[in-house]
Amino acid sequence: MEETHKVLAQNRMGYRLSSTIVVTAPQLLSQLILPGMVQLTPSGEILIATADCQVSGGYLQVLCLSEEALAVLVQKKRRRTAYFSKYTSSKATLNYGP
């Protein structure tokens, strides 16, 4: 079952999506962040790094969007819905509902 996420905020640094995901991982040391990197905050929000993203961060990194998925994401505005799909080749995509 796919969970639908709502775009809560966006700017050139990244997108913040709603989520009901519960994060139980310990706080991490800062790690390299690249555009397309998807992170989960301790509160369960999803952060997706875009063009002018920070260079390091300490949230749990769960996947990295393909260039195509990131190009789709940056065209979307607040309050749009999105969901993730996994390819069999272990690449994730971001899709948009109506």
Image (spheres, rainbow, N blue to C red):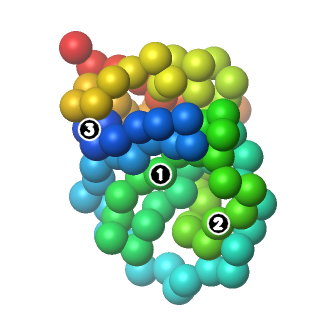
Q: Could you tell whether 73 is left or right of 32 in the image? A: left
Crowd class of label 3 (few under 14; some 14 to 19; many from 20; radius 10 Å) = some
Residue 67 in percent (x, y) is at 68, 24
Task: Name the one closer to the observer, 68 or 32.
Answer: 32
The spot of residue 9 in percent (x, y) is 34, 41
Residue visible at 36% across and 58% down? 45
Distance from label 1 to label 3 (Cα)?
Answer: 12 Å
Please report whichever mark, 1 or 2, sits nearer to the chain's N-terminal start.
1
Q: Amino acid at mark 2?
A: Gly
Residue for point 28% across, 30% down: 78
Q: Which mark is residue 57?
A: 2
Q: Mark 1 falls on what kind of element?
A: strand
Nearer the observer, 35 or 81: 35
Residue type at tag 1 = Leu
Cα–Cα gap, marks 3 and 2: 22 Å
Which image quadrant for residue 80? top left
Secondary structure at numbered mark 3 = strand
Left or right: residue 45 compared with residue 60: left
- For discs 3 and 2, the disc positioned in front in the rendered view: 2
Q: Quadrant of residue 52?
A: top right
Say if residue 71 shows up in the picture: yes
Crowding at label 2, few (<14), some or many (≥20) Cα neighbours within 10 Å?
Answer: some
User: Residue at label 3?
Assistant: 6
Given contact means CB atoms under 8 Å apart, are the residues at marks 1 and 2 in contact? Answer: yes
Residue at horizontal 28 percent and vertical 42 percent from the top: 8
Placement of the C terminus among the 4 image quadrants: top left
Q: Amino acid at mark 3?
A: Lys
Q: Which residue is mark 1?
A: 47
Which badge, 1 or 3, comes first in the chain's sequence? 3
| Image side of residue 43 versus residue 13, left or right | left
Quadrant of the image occupied by residue 89: top right
